[in-house]
Amino acid sequence: MKLLTWRNTLRAALWGGGAAAVLAVIAAIAAAVYVVRVTEDLPDYQQLAEYTPPIMSRVHAGDGLLIAEYAREHRVFVPIENIPPMLTEAFLSAEDKNFYTHGGVDYLGMVRGGIRSILDRLQNPNAPLQSGSTITQQVAKNFLFSSDQEIERKVREIVIARRMERAFTKDQILELYLNEIYFGNRAYGVAAAALNYFDKSLDELELHEVAYLAALPKAPNNYHPTRRTESAIGRRNWVLTRMVANGYITREQAEQAMAMPLEAVDRLEGDTYLAAEYFVEQVRREVFGRYGEDELYDGGLSIRTSLDTTMQLAARRALRDGLESYDRRHGYRGPVAQLAGFDDWPARLADVEGPRDTDEGWRLALVLEVADGHADIGFEDRTRGRVPLYALEWARAAGRDDETFPERGPAVRSTVDVLAQGDVILVEALTAEAYPEETVEEGDYGLRQVPEVNGGIVAIDPFTGRVLSMVGGYSLPRASLIARCRRAASRAPPSSPSSTPQRWTMATRRCRSFWTRPLSRPAMRRCDSTGRKIIRKCFTGLRHCAGG
């Protein structure tokens, strides 16, 4: 009996085809059930259409200078029509050249990504999946609050991407993408990235800077401009080659951009921003109390203040100089730390945690050798210097007498009276202006210490009541004297001297009511008299707050 006949072959083919069709239907049903199950809690059309990303609030001084930003995500929203075409072309070249032609999902790209994932997993079982995501899918990730490369999240991402293509136009999706994605360096969106990396607005960016920003979304940490400069430049140049291939720029333009160095800047740093830290913290508390947390950190508020940046810098410098001078008159309290032995001392010195927010130019140094007339010091970069004896005359030992009043030890006769080998100290380069009677040489440093005493300055325009400057202490990381007094006042009974700051505030408000109109001479005398009484009460309260 023949088994291999045309009839048997046809019958087997029919049975096999039927079984395959049944399995295909079952698989389709299972896939549909799986998709419905994993996507049942996804946002609908209305939620997608109403979505707006959180935007940071910005604080400006009276002269328009930006002095602070409050945000969970540092973002400045820019409409698509205000984004330069060169910028959008760079991102399309780097991320999704077919953006305007596909329906939200690039299936061919997903197949390529799947093949790459299989090859990578064969070499490394823990290798991440290659997703082949379109720009629409990358925007969809933000609705899922997850970037895990898992199949379930990928299915949810595809469904949201398809819904977004029906809820938004292509330009709206691109607008969301360019304003939503994370660029590293605390920046969300291209406008914040341009500010944080280059301190420029979008229309000020040059081609090589635009290409670098387009290189970042793939992996911001892998292309850091200073820590991984070579990788960052390589990725930037790759974006430029893709822009040439897509016809957005010429080869000559790309070569000129590739030759440019990658130079990033530090924004919102420096003396002006440090000087305003107490003021902007008070602004933050005021806005938080008035509008709430969400509006402050996500609402995109533009806050214009009365701060005079020139006066603020002068107030901070005056307070610091005064506190440092007062503190030195009460003696030297000893080194920051002590190192035993000098084995690998530069690395050990680098591990010493010094005081925060010290004056610019103050450095940690290790005392290497002590002689009668000077001490040799070394820094973590292995450079050397010396501390001459005349720069140590103030550093008499600090102490207290039997009645706990401050007193100083005997006059400094030799360097060994103050310093010893292994001392970790704070020093600052000496200048001829500070010591006109001495011969200051290059490499001479003076001993410094962070003041133990604290203080505060508030400058108010008496005719408008506007706060022009506010310095709440030597440094913000240390406990604020103003904050301590406010806390003490809130806990103290009305008869306690610690309630003086409250009376000070109320009296200031009463006196300020006079200044809302032109003042007569008697009124000015009354305000002047009230002000003197307030100041006396204030310092009485400060003594109680400071513990005597």
Image: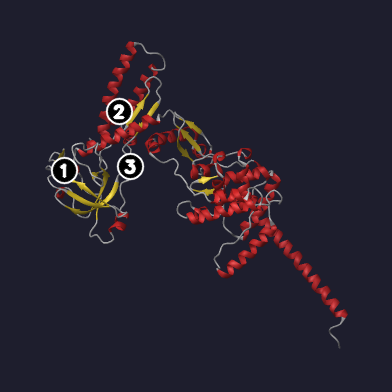
Where residue 500 is drawn, which disc sits there?
2
Name the spot of residue 364 as percent of width and height, x first. 29, 49
Mark 1 lies on a secondary structure that is loop
Badge 2 or badge 1: first in the primary sequence: 1
The quadrant of the picture occupied by the C terminus is top left
Q: Which of the marked residues, 1 or 3, is nearer the chain's N terminus?
A: 3
Left or right? Give the position of 260 relative to 38: left
Q: Which residue is mark 1?
A: 396
Q: Residue at x 17, y 48 (%)?
A: 418
At label 2, counting other C-alpha atoms closer than 10 Å, the crowd grade (few under 14, some 14-19, many 20 or more) is many
Gap between marks 3 and 2, in whole Å? 35 Å
- Amino acid on which the number 1 mark rests in the picture: Arg
Q: Residue 374: x, y in percent?
A: 18, 48
Q: In the drawing, does residue 99 fall left or right of residue 279?
A: right
Sort mark 3 into few (<14), some (14-19) or many (20+) by Cα contacts within 10 Å. few
Query: Residue extending furthest right?
Result: 7
The answer to whether residue 31 is left or right of residue 462 is: right
First in residue order: circle 3 vs circle 2 = 3
